[in-house]
Amino acid sequence: MSSPRKVVVFDYGFGNVRSAERALARVGADVEITRDFDRAMNADGLLVPGVGAFAACMQGLKEARGDWIVDRRLAGGRPVMGICVGMQILFARGIEHGVETEGLDEWPGAVEPLRADIVPHMGWNTVEAPADSELFAGLDADARFYFVHSYAVHDWTLETHNPALTAPRVTWSTHGKPFVAAVENGALWATQFHPEKSGDAGAQLLTNWIGTL
């Protein structure tokens, strides 16, 4: 029997690390909450949570050297998963209250205010995942996930022209206007919603991620 996959929940001060830890442990991962550089680099999977403001999360991540860790892990093909603002900071920039902040720029695009009458988007919603999604494998089309956010990416602009590379799989949801709900792009996966708060559907999604580590 293979040993459990080692997952580090990166603790940089912005994220529901305890709920993420419990959800990952529940589906069989060997989980540790830490900001230790070597442990984060060497884990089978790195989960980057995030709550609050884009700019504050970016500042906290840089102070913990998390930006360098994410970049070096991805350069070596080591899995990283971002959740909520932990997904948003993977994009080139975030725009909050008219202020633009540089993100990690793993993906092009801007995180902007939701284009909806009711903000924040808080509660359960469905998603539209690609047919070949690994992240949503085994989940029904009407599966619902828990969202809490006021900002999102509305335009996906990254294109893959090399036929030898798998094109990013982008999952959408709608609140007012469509927005990016999840991305699978090589070793880098992310969700705008909170799988750790999404019951059985979220547990299946985390199981799918761990199965790729």
Image: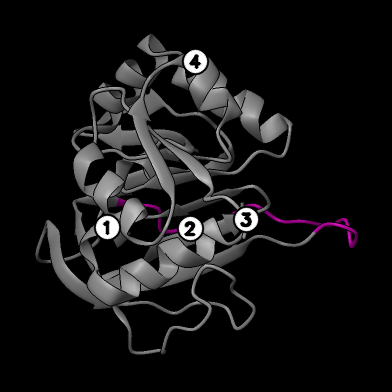
Tag 1 and tag 2, C-beta contact below 8 Å = no
Gap between marks 4 and 1 measured at Cα: 24 Å
Instruction: Tell me the mark number nearer the camera, choosing from 1 and 3.
Output: 3
Relative to 168, residue 103 above or below: above
Relative to 199, residue 72 above or below: above
Q: Quadrant of residue 146?
A: bottom left
Gap between marks 1 and 3 measured at Cα: 24 Å
- Which is nearer the eye, 77 or 100? 77
Q: Amino acid at mark 1?
A: Glu
- The answer to whether residue 161 is magenta is yes
Q: Mark 3 sits on what residue?
A: 2
Sequence-wise, the earlier of marks 2 and 3 is 3
Q: Which residues are magenta?
A: 152-165
Q: Residue most toward the top?
A: 63
- The answer to whether residue 33 is magenta is no
Gap between marks 2 and 4 measured at Cα: 33 Å
Residue 162 position within the rendered picture, expressed as x and y whole percent measured from the top left: 88, 56
Sequence-wise, the earlier of marks 4 and 3 is 3
Gap between marks 2 and 3 measured at Cα: 40 Å
Residue 185 position within the rendered picture, expressed as x and y whole percent measured from the top left: 63, 54
Q: Mark 4 sits on what residue?
A: 37
Helix, strand or loop under label 2: loop
Q: Mark 1 sits on what residue?
A: 196
Q: Amino acid at mark 3?
A: Ser
Q: Mark 2 sits on what residue?
A: 155
Sequence-wise, the earlier of marks 1 and 2 is 2
Q: Residue at x 32, y 46 (%)?
A: 112
